[in-house]
Amino acid sequence: MAPYRLDVVSLAPQAFAPLLELGVIGRAFGSGIAELHLHNPRDFATDRYRKVDDEPYGGGAGMVLKPEPVFAAVESIPRRSGARVLLMSPQGRPLQQADLQRWAHDHDQLVLLCGHYEGFDERIRSLVDEEVSAGDFVLTGGELPAMTVINGVVRLLPGTVGTAQSLVEESHSALLLEHPHYTRPAEFQGMAVPEVLRGGNHGAIEAWRQQQREQRTRDRRPDLYARWRMASDDSGAAMTLRIGNGYDIHRLVSGRPLILGGVTLEHPDGLGLDGHSDADVLVHAVMDALLGALSLGDIGKYFPPTDPQWKGADSLQLLEQVVALVSQRGWQVVNVDAVVIAERPKLKPHIEAMRGNIASRIGIAAEAVGVKATTNERLGPEGREEGISCQAVVLLGQP
């Protein structure tokens, strides 16, 4: 089995050297479980000064990373069929354990782009499959978030960690934080190890650990606890569920952008979707389903096409407002499933990014968002390329 390949595009490749000597992660690289390749855009600069940044168009503070050396660096990387290109950016979707698990299990190569300076040329975004953020803060570069991703993915690869059970029980793997751990001595500075852990009753130990997981999550991360309760209600109380259906269709016209799931696409004939907002039929159908599940009307009630404030609006921002309405009524989104009906362009290469965009705005894992694409076999308005439509179903839960 070929090693898991990690390629990093960074202006500070020396920052990654400690990973090769870092405990189980370093041993994973040394034993061939994973391999790390570093690519400095400066090596691909074509001018005599190896310049990789320049002043921003329109003025402003700071320097902007140029597209040419970054494109050249990325295009020089041998690409496997299961490769995924990630951009480390404070504008990306917050990193979650489920992302690390997905990249470790579903892919065999990650290409990580590390931004630097004030920012990077917007065209660099066309190279990536996903944008990833380490949190709501800004660093001088993307190296530390990239190292976080590498560490998190490599430790999940078979053979890196001694016991697979430790990966199952750790924090976030099942939406619960990990239970407390103790070792010798049995008492230290007046603090004793709980008696149950010293009694040898494995059933009682597991019950105590589960109780501690739940209590810690409830106290420290109530958001995770609510999601866990919806996924697995151990109290015996019946969970209230609601299902909503959503539908939207927009005409294809010239002179408009084509945006689906927050991703800007290129139609072979240069067509886009007509509408008052950005006309994102995928996001609109999801919003329609959310509102329908709680009998709150349709999206036109909240974002009327006659209101100038919604002209050209980003539908993902509107989705956040709809999710807030759902939350205010005591409901949470369990999962979303949607199908986009379009003859062209091909949507498969962009599905993961669409799922990620929708998941991050709703506040659920990407695994809880399904997006599929199909043609209409040249039948109807979608088949004649008069428009693109979408159907969506959502499940809401209330513990």
Image (spheres, grey):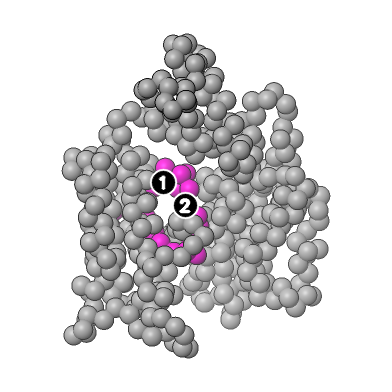
| Residue projecting furthest to the front | 189
Amino acid at pointer 2: Leu
Identify the magenta region: 78-103
Is 44 placed left or right of 208 in the picture? left
Instruction: For the N terminus, give its image quadrant.
Output: top left
Dividing the picture into quarters, in which one does residue 72 lie?
A: bottom left
Residue 259 badge: none
Image spot of residue 260 (x, y percent): 57, 63
Foreground pick, 248 / 322: 322
Q: Earlier in the sequence, mark 2 or mark 1?
A: 2
Relative to 16, is 334 above or below?
above
For disc 1, the marked residue is 100
Magenta span contains residue 74? no
Residue at horizontal 42%, vertical 69%?
Answer: 125
Which type of secondary structure does the marked residue at label 1 adopt? helix
Is 91 placed left or right of 18 in the picture? right
Image spot of residue 77 (x, y percent): 25, 62
Image spot of residue 90 (x, y percent): 47, 64
Relative to 201, is 103 above or below?
below
Residue at horizontal 51%, vertical 24%?
Answer: 209
Amino acid at pointer 1: Leu
Residue at horizontal 71%, vertical 55%?
Answer: 324
